[in-house]
Amino acid sequence: MRSVRGTTSNPKVTHFGNSESVSHIPTILVFDSGLGGLTVLREIVRARPDARYVYAADDAFFPYGQHSEDAIVARVVPVIGELIAAHAPDLVVIACNTASTLVMGHLRRAWPVPFVGTVPAIKPACARSVSKRVSVLGTSGTVKREYTRTLIADFAGGCDVTLVGSADLASMAEAELGGGSIDDADLLAEIAPCFVDRGAAGRTDTVVLACTHYPLLLARFMALAPWPVTWIDPAPAIARRVVELLGPGDATATAPAAQMLFTSGRPHAMAAALAPFFGAAAVHHA
Ligand code: DGL
């Protein structure tokens, strides 16, 4: 792997920003396997437009959904260590369900910086479902996780939960963001298993978007859905958690420049398409 700083990292980190200073601008590191985490970043930027953002995409290892659990832990923990050493963030958001359902304990044990993870929003989905039929659409990795099964056991509250794993939707979402055209039939084949109709016993009324890439396709999903459902995107809840941890900040402050990093080191072809996710901030690509 190419170093995320372009240099060899020093894993010994002693400083996570200076939260005592009144004028301190917090640095928020948002991490995903690729571009899906931008859907989470977008909500955090709306809530804290005054923060300094570093968005890191582990595109050299994308898609995470195809890797084993051990391989993801072995990959993500040191990459996050390098990013912490390089950027001294005040808070780190793991904007990836496939990683968060595995690595949060490892990260919290390794570094004292606050971490916010992204895990399938099963509890709020089941609480709001009227038909008590909820589907969870995630990567094939996320739907297999023990963590996800435990969320269902603890929070389904009498709901019938259907797990739908997709091997390709994250890549389709990146293609769509890049201006490619994904066929309706291909997208429908991925989401169709979410729509369960048991006749008089009710049908699915709520679908959890359990991969941060999927909100990029939400307009397409809504157009293709065989009947209307509520789609649960966890990003607003994650933004609220960030504000709880860092405070409300100053909504009138000028946005500091943001940084976007790719672990492949490839210059990114879609810089213009990605800029709106960062709000008013100028984005430097590295
Ligand atoms: N965005 C990631 C998630 O939330 C996964 C995409 C991938 O397979 O890398 O699960």
Image: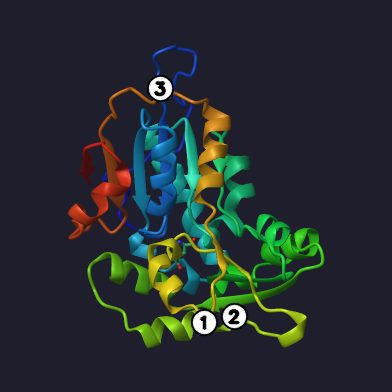
Amino acid type of the residue tagged 1 in the rendering: Pro
**In this image, 278 relative to 282: left or right?**
right
**Badge 2 is on which residue?**
195
Q: Is residue 21 above or below residue 72?
A: above
Q: State the residue at coordinates (28%, 37%).
A: 258
Find out whether the residues at labels 2 and 1 contact each other: C-beta distance under 8 Å.
yes
**Badge 3 is on which residue?**
250
Q: Is residue 4 above or below residue 131?
A: above
Q: Which is nearer the eye, 168 or 194?
A: 194
Find out whether the residues at labels 3 and 2 contact each other: C-beta distance under 8 Å.
no
Q: Earlier in the sequence, mark 3 or mark 1?
A: 1
Label 1 CB less than 8 angstroms from ligand 1? no
User: Residue 226 shows which numbered tag?
Assistant: 1
Distance (Cα) linking label 3 and label 1: 43 Å
In terms of image quadrants, where is residue 161?
A: bottom right
Residue 227 visible in the shown view:
yes
Residue 209 visible in the shown view:
no
Q: Which is nearer the eye, 160 or 92?
A: 160
Q: Which is nearer the eye, 73 or 214?
A: 214
Residue density around tag 3, few if under 14, some if 14–19, many if 20 or more, within 10 Å: some
In terms of image quadrants, where is residue 141?
A: bottom right
Q: Secondary structure at mark 1?
A: loop
Q: State the residue at coordinates (52%, 28%).
A: 246
